[in-house]
Amino acid sequence: MSNPVYQTVIVGGGFTGLFTALHLSHQHYPRSVILIDREERFCFRPLLYEYASGEMEANQVVPRFEELLRGSGVIFVQDTVQSVDLHQRQVALASGTSYDYSNLVLALGSVTNYLGVEGAKEYALPLRTQENAIAIDRHLRDCLQQAREVEDHQQRRQVLTVVVVGAGPNGVEMAGTLGDLLPKWYENLGGNQEEIRVVLLNHGPNILKGDINQSLREAAGQELQKRTVPVELVMEAEATAVRPNELEYKRHDQTETLPTATVIWTAGTHPHPLVKDLPVSNEHQDKHGRVLVTRTMQLPDFQEVFAGGDCAAIEGESLPPTAQVAYQQGNAIAHNLDAIALGRELKPAQVRLRGSFLKLGLENSVANLLERYKVTGEPGHLIRHGTYLTLLPAPIHDFQATTQWLNEEIFERHLQRVKTADVVKWVGGAIVAAVVVRQLLNRNGSAATRRSKLKSKRTGDRNRKD
């Protein structure tokens, strides 16, 4: 190899990739940083349901990378990665450009897994990106408009039936949201909201099985039945084919069909295809095809390469594929990249789970705080929102989003109409949101002080190293 180029390349702008870049910027990382993603915008996936339902704006849920990285010193490249050569330390892009690296961060995430089901890729709708959310919104509105013009009852029933495949957290949140949203939309068109049908179909016998949210199963099941249109649960049903006007599934050795114009697919994911092409031995991959990394988030055979988020798993640990995990892994990777640059000792990633949250309808969620406290309904909605808003990238961005939401959600909408008997619940939610805002204010207000101290400390460290 020629003389090494001292730059860090981050492949993938999800939670792990973006927050690695932001933390490096905040730490005044001495090497150049390049972040590569095929999309123009970062997608805050936990709040994508709010974007799809119109509860939150695009600038809050899918802000542009250039906006988030402005002034950070991080170079953003919008392009598709064609290949990653770990031996030559080079990333090649679809545009023909290639980047050499001294350190690489793999934050490729995961892609939709259609499990080989006939027609699923062609006719089912996933929800993983802004484009997916827009496509679902348009499709559903078209169906509702079409239904108003259909006189035949059976045909109208088909058009107004929505099937969500997969009862993990994504499927449960989607079904719950649609159970409130679609009746509202249809009624606004002059339709009968009772004609709306939302079906949640799952291969296993229970919703949320094997998930971090499984402790919320009972509460989630109850809340799904309280929606404007109760969500129908079809369990132990394996989807076998998706067609333009029906879903075929197998249940108790019987093949059945469900007439529907809409199938939303949340049944599974698998690692990004680029991960499969990496020269990583089978012993350094888990059963899902993710690369195994050390506790310092490095590939065992390529110590200059870090990986986190949905495309990686830490050896000997089992962590859920959630935003809070990816966020904390990005922080750990940034710390260790900085340690390498300054000749310091690397530290193991410390991931602390704050709890689990599920959106179960408009203005309704269930929150499990630290595995000890369960809060449902609109207070749960406030807690979920407040918690996720603390993870929105860039201090200015998350402060603006939080204050905007707090003003609209609590002061303008709720406190003007609550009854005396509800005051205790609303105060609890408001306190949580207020704490969030205070934390953001403290973080913003002390940023300059921390940067000054950090800069002085780094100067001393480099002088000692020299």
Image (cartoon, grey):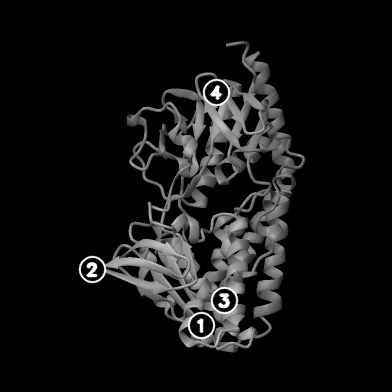
Residue for badge 1: 156
Q: Earlier in the sequence, mark 2 or mark 3?
A: 3
**Camera-side residue: 71 or 168?**
168
Residue for badge 3: 181
**The quadrant where residue 72 appears:** top right
Q: Which class describes the residues within 10 Å of circle 2: few (<14), some (14-19), or many (20+)?
A: few
Q: Is residue 180 above or below residue 3?
A: below
Residue for badge 2: 252
Q: Is residue 178 above or below residue 111?
A: below
Q: Nearer the viewer, mark 4 or mark 3?
A: 3
Task: Check disc 2 and give the amino acid type.
Answer: His
Horizontal and vertical percent for residue 327? 54, 46
- Per the image, label 2 sits on a secondary structure element best described as loop
- Per the image, label 1 sits on a secondary structure element best described as helix
Residue for badge 4: 344
**The quadrant where residue 405 appears:** bottom right
The answer to the question of whether label 2 and label 1 lie on touching residues, with beta carbons closer than 8 A, is no
**Camera-side residue: 133 or 314?**
133
Alpha carbon separation for disc pair 2 and 1: 29 Å
Task: Check disc 3 and give the amino acid type.
Answer: Leu
Dividing the image into 4 quarters, which one contains the N terminus? top right
